[in-house]
Image: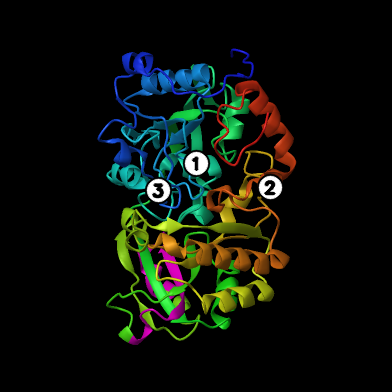
């Protein structure tokens, strides 16, 4: 591994011709008619104007782009699926390395593994693996990129049974800050491999991921809606504690969506919901439905057998591209009555139909990996909460951000200081050390080895 030194170069308008010669993909600058589309990211709150966007066609393009950013002193953002809540897939006056064209996937059904390029989304991945009756823990929105989710940890519908996404990562190919392609796994560059599993985008541009797969075909999935009543999450809390790991549920507070299985009088009104993914035997589906019914008065329900990839799309319609998002998140060792009271109170004032709170269980298989086995440190957490407004009118930004920050402040007495990096906004840099706890110093040392110049700093950054 080459030892690097920090560059003192100040970013200036670069000569892009060497980059155009080196790259087989697209090199798009502000004069290009494709520029506005190329610079756009999922979260419209982050309307940045990079100096250049490189749409990489392959790993060689990624290597060339990283080297160019290093040599010119340009700020560097790496974009996979573009879902970063904090907008870290773009930057002003820098280079955006867009991996979105790199979406190849190869499934080895015999070994139960899949290698996927860094631009893949979970829709891509689930489509490829489902053909073989296999899956791994992914996100809950199908357009989410595999890269950001994996590097931050990765919670989803299979977490309780098979662990976090990063727990199922077997290896990766990474372009590091010196522009070289590094293979890492348990036997090659083990410190880098350790850091990638939860340490965020701090260590390089990951151009491919190798995952462990598990036999999953159909699941019993879908939402059940209840009144906004604190007794529902209290009963759900008991349900989680008393459920087999195949029974994954997410608890949500939201405004009733305009779906046919929810009576119209509840559309737009605050409700609770439980989103189910039962990956156990089909002959127990009836028991699962009974347990959902026992949580409270059911206002509406759509819980049915479906292919696993379908359950990964249930939030897609609620979170289309082009909305403005401001999110917060936290971990907690329990879902206390005090936290539930806060969720119910802020549930009464949800600012839009696309705004919600989602509580993820972090237990079962997630707890079978130790707190220092991967960079993801919060293995003693039992729940992770994501909450925040999503809205269509930028004029509503100040009001929505203030609402979310007040919500966050009200929850702090009932949660840990740490928060899941994939749920945090760009004003949460102060929480990085708390997020990594006892792993922070090892991450600093790994960063110092692989990126001493802090080229990969546009993220929830670990400073070398």
Name the residue at 44% across, 51% down. 139
Image x and y of residue 189, in percent = 58, 22
Question: Spatial distance from mark 1 to mark 2, Cα to Cα?
Answer: 16 Å
Name the residue at 41% across, 23% down. 62
Mark closest to the chain's N terminus, 3 or 1: 1
Q: Is residue 161 left or right of residue 143?
A: right
In front: label 2 or label 3: 2
Image x and y of residue 48, in percent = 44, 42
- Scheme of image coloration: rainbow
Residue 104 bears which disc, if any? Answer: none
State yes or no: residue 300 in magenta: no
Residue 430 bears which disc, if any? Answer: 2
The quadrant the C terminus occupies is top right
Considering the numbered disc 3 on the image, is that residue within a helix, a strand or a loop? Answer: loop
Tell me if residue 326 comes above or below residue 433 in the rendering. Answer: below
Name the residue at 36% across, 63% down. 318
- Mark 1 Cα within 10 Å, few/some/many (few <14, many 20+)? many
Question: Spatial distance from mark 3 to mark 1, Cα to Cα?
Answer: 14 Å
Image x and y of residue 116, in percent = 37, 34
Mark closest to the chain's N terminus, 2 or 3: 3
Q: Which residues are magenta?
A: 265-288
- Residue designated by label 3: 144
Question: Spatial distance from mark 2 to mark 3, Cα to Cα?
Answer: 25 Å
- Mark 2 Cα within 10 Å, few/some/many (few <14, many 20+)? few
Q: How many marks?
A: 3
Considering the numbered disc 1 on the image, is that residue within a helix, a strand or a loop? Answer: loop
- Mark 3 Cα within 10 Å, few/some/many (few <14, many 20+)? many
Q: Nearer the viewer, residue 227 or 92?
A: 92
Residue 88 bears which disc, if any? Answer: 1
């Amino acid at each position: 591994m080459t030892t690097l030194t920090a560059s003192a170069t100040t970013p200036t308008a670069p000569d892009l011709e060497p980059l155009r010669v080196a790259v087989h993909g697209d090199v798009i600058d502000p004069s290009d008619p494709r520029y506005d589309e190329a610079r756009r990211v999922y979260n419209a709150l982050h309307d940045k104007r990079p100096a250049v966007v490189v749409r990489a066609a392959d790993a060689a393009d990624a290597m060339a782009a990283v080297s160019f950013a290093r040599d010119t002193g340009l700020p560097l953002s790496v974009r996979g699926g573009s879902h970063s809540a904090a907008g870290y897939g773009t930057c002003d006056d820098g280079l955006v390395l867009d991996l979105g064209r790199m979406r190849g996937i190869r499934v080895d059904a015999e070994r139960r593994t899949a290698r996927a390029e860094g631009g893949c989304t979970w829709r891509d991945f689930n489509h490829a693996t489902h053909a073989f009756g296999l899956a791994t823990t992914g996100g809950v929105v199908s357009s989410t990129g595999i890269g950001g989710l994996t590097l931050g940890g990765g919670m989803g519908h299979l977490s309780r049974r098979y662990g976090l996404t990063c727990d199922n990562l077997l290896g990766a190919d990474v372009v590091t800050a010196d522009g070289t392609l590094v293979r890492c796994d348990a036997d090659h560059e083990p410190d880098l491999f350790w850091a990638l599993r939860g340490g965020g985008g701090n260590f390089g541009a990951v151009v491919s991921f190798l995952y462990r797969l598990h036999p999953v075909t159909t699941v019993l999935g879908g939402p059940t809606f209840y009144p906004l009543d604190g007794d529902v999450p209290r009963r759900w809390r008991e349900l989680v504690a008393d459920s087999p790991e195949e029974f994954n549920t997410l608890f949500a507070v939201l405004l009733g969506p305009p779906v046919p299985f929810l009576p119209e009088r509840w559309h737009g009104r605050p409700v609770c919901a439980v989103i189910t993914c039962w990956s156990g035997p089909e002959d127990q589906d009836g028991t699962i439905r009974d347990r959902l019914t026992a949580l409270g008065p059911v206002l509406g329900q759509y819980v049915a057998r479906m292919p696993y990839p379908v359950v990964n799309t249930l939030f897609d319609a609620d979170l289309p591209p082009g909305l403005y998002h401001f999110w917060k998140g936290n971990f907690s060792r329990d879902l206390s009555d005090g936290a539930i009271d806060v969720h119910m109170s802020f549930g009464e004032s949800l600012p839009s139909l696309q705004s919600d709170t989602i509580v993820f269980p972090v237990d079962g298989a997630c707890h079978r990996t130790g707190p220092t086995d991967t960079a993801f440190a919060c293995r003693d957490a039992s729940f992770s909460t994501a909450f925040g407004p999503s809205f269509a009118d930028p004029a509503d930004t100040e009001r929505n951000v203030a609402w979310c920050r007040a919500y966050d402040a009200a929850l702090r007495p009932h949660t840990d200081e740490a928060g899941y990096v994939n749920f945090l906004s760009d004003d949460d840099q102060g929480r990085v050390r708390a997020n990594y706890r006892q792993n922070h110093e090892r991450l600093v040392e790994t960063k110092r080895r692989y990126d001493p110049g802090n080229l990969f700093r546009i993220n929830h950054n670990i400073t070398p």
